[in-house]
Image: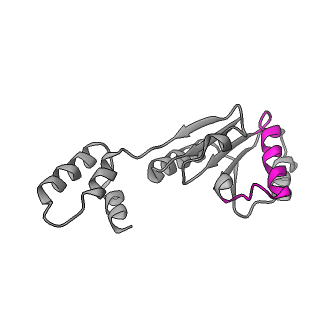
């Protein structure tokens, strides 16, 4: 089974990713930017006392992987082939395009999108617009956006 977690709401998607990690006792965490086919095969086919299914958590695989590279294609094919016996959870900090999601046909996709209120608020940041800006700020808070994220977006 493959689960792909992506979207521009990084904080909520990360919380969901961490919750999934807490549900699995024995898991392997791999970095998608540094992953090799050897690492993946060794972690999956490594001998254990029992023949349990393994859970592999990979961060930033689809965004950091060079899709033209031969080893990258091998990694994606291996994950697709081995997903029947093992569980893979892929976390991406950006929204993944549908053509990239189509690489894994039976994947469960969890998409986390920021509410549009935050972008309306950020577009209206200008001098002498305080009344409208306060309304938009409170609308953003009411839609579930955390204050820290709003501050981060203003700073960015």
Nearer to the camera, 32 or 99: 99
Nearer to the camera, 18 or 149: 149
123 left or right, relative to 32: left
Residue 74 lies in the magenta stretch: yes
Camera sees residue 52: no
Q: Position of residue 144 (x, y in %)?
A: 32, 44
Camera sees residue 130: yes
Quadrant position of the N terminus in the picture: top right
Task: State the extent of the magenta-drawn residues as a range.
Answer: 64-86
80 left or right, relative to 141: right
Q: In which quarter of the image is residue 101?
A: top right
Whether 86 is drawn above or below 154: the answer is above
Nearer to the camera, 149 or 22: 149
Quadrant position of the C terminus in the picture: bottom left
Q: Position of residue 124 (x, y in %)?
A: 24, 57
70 left or right, relative to 147: right
The residue lying at 36 percent from left, 58 percent from top is: 149
The residue lying at 79 percent from left, 55 percent from top is: 72
Q: Where is residue 132 in the image (x, y as percent from the top left)?
A: 15, 53
149 left or right, relative to 7: left
The residue lying at 27 percent from left, 54 percent from top is: 121
Residue 34 lies in the magenta stretch: no
Query: Which secondary structure class fits the magenta region best?
Result: helix
Spot the residue most to the top. Answer: 106
The residue lying at 64 percent from left, 55 percent from top is: 63
Q: Where is residue 109 in the image (x, y as percent from the top left)?
A: 59, 37
Q: In which quarter of the image is residue 39?
A: bottom right
């Amino acid at each position: 089974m493959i689960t792909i977690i992506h979207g521009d709401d990084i904080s909520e998607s990360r919380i969901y990713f961490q919750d999934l990690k807490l549900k699995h006792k024995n898991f392997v965490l791999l970095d998608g930017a540094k992953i090799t086919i050897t690492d993946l095969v060794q972690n999956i086919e490594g001998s254990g006392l029992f023949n349990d299914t393994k859970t592999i958590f990979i961060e930033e695989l689809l965004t950091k992987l060079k899709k033209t590279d031969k080893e990258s294609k091998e990694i994606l094919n291996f994950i697709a082939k081995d997903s029947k016996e093992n569980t893979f959870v892929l976390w991406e900090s950006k929204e993944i395009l549908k053509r990239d999601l189509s690489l894994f046909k039976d994947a469960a996709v969890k998409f986390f999108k920021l509410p549009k209120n935050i972008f309306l608020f950020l577009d209206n940041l200008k001098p002498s617009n305080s009344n409208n800006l306060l309304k938009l700020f409170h609308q953003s808070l009411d839609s579930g956006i955390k204050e820290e994220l709003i501050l981060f977006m203003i700073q960015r």
